Image: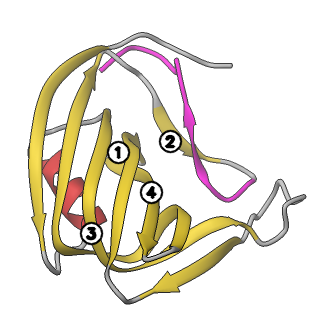
């Protein structure tokens, strides 16, 4: 286990509107406001997305390929995520429960994750951390905690 202690900084309340690309909007806010580390909470709708729902090969530990499920039919979501730096830029990692009717999908919405009507997002900045994402043999940029002097 790796860990370090931080403290809550600024809190941003964000309304994304129909058609906005979720990752682009949240990462643009982080860049504009110089947010390096944060927790993210969201509720609302996604119009479309490609959702990583686990690895294609559950035994692979290197060069992992994600199993992608796509939708384009406007669904409800509730999600949580984090923002940490990767290669000098704040990057969002987000997971959500996504549903329509009696169908549910849970995973990491990535490809073309686009807002349907409204997405309410709370971004809670975390101060005093040195945590960042570092690419490893898995092929993913994974969180590394306690790497040095706090930002």
Q: Main secondary structure of the magenta part?
A: loop
Q: Which residue in the protein does label 3 denote?
A: 45
Give the SS element for disc 4.
Answer: strand
In the image, is 11 to the left or to the right of 44? left
* x and y percentages locating residue 44 in the rendered image: 24, 61
User: Could you say which is closer to the camera, residue 106 or residue 95?
Assistant: 106
Contact, CB < 8 Å: mark 4 with mark 2? no
Q: Earlier in the sequence, mark 3 or mark 1?
A: 3
Residue count near mark 3 (Cα–Cα under 10 Å), binned few <14, some 14–19, many ≥20: many
Q: What stretch of residues is rendered in magenta?
A: 138-151
Q: Earlier in the sequence, mark 2 or mark 1?
A: 1
Give the SS element for disc 2.
Answer: strand
Q: CA distance from mark 3 to mark 4?
A: 11 Å
Q: Which residue in the protein does label 1 denote?
A: 88
Q: Earlier in the sequence, mark 4 or mark 1?
A: 1
Q: Residue at x 42, y 53 (%)?
A: 94
Q: Residue at x 90, y 58 (%)?
A: 59
Q: Residue at x 43, y 77 (%)?
A: 101
Q: Which residue in the protein does label 4 denote?
A: 96
Q: CA distance from mark 3 to mark 1?
A: 30 Å
In the image, is 17 to the left or to the right of 100? left
* x and y percentages locating residue 33 in the rendered image: 10, 41
Residue 41 figure quarter:
top left
Q: Which residue in the protein does label 2 denote?
A: 133
């Amino acid at each position: 286990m790796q860990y370090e202690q931080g403290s809550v900084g600024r809190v941003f309340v964000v309304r994304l509107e129909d058609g906005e690309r979720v990752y682009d909007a949240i990462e643009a806010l982080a860049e504009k406001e110089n947010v390096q580390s944060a927790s993210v909470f969201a509720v609302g709708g996604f119009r479309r997305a490609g959702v990583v729902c686990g690895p294609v090969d559950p035994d692979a530990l290197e060069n992992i390929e994600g199993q992608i499920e796509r939708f384009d039919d406007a669904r409800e979501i509730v999600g949580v995520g984090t923002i940490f730096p990767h290669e000098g830029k704040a990057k969002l990692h987000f997971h959500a429960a996504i549903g329509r009717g009696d169908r549910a999908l849970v995973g990491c919405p990535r490809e073309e994750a686009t807002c349907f009507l409204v997405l309410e997002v709370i971004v809670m900045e975390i101060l005093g951390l040195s945590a960042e994402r570092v690419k490893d043999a898995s092929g993913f940029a994974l969180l590394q905690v306690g790497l040095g002097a706090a930002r």
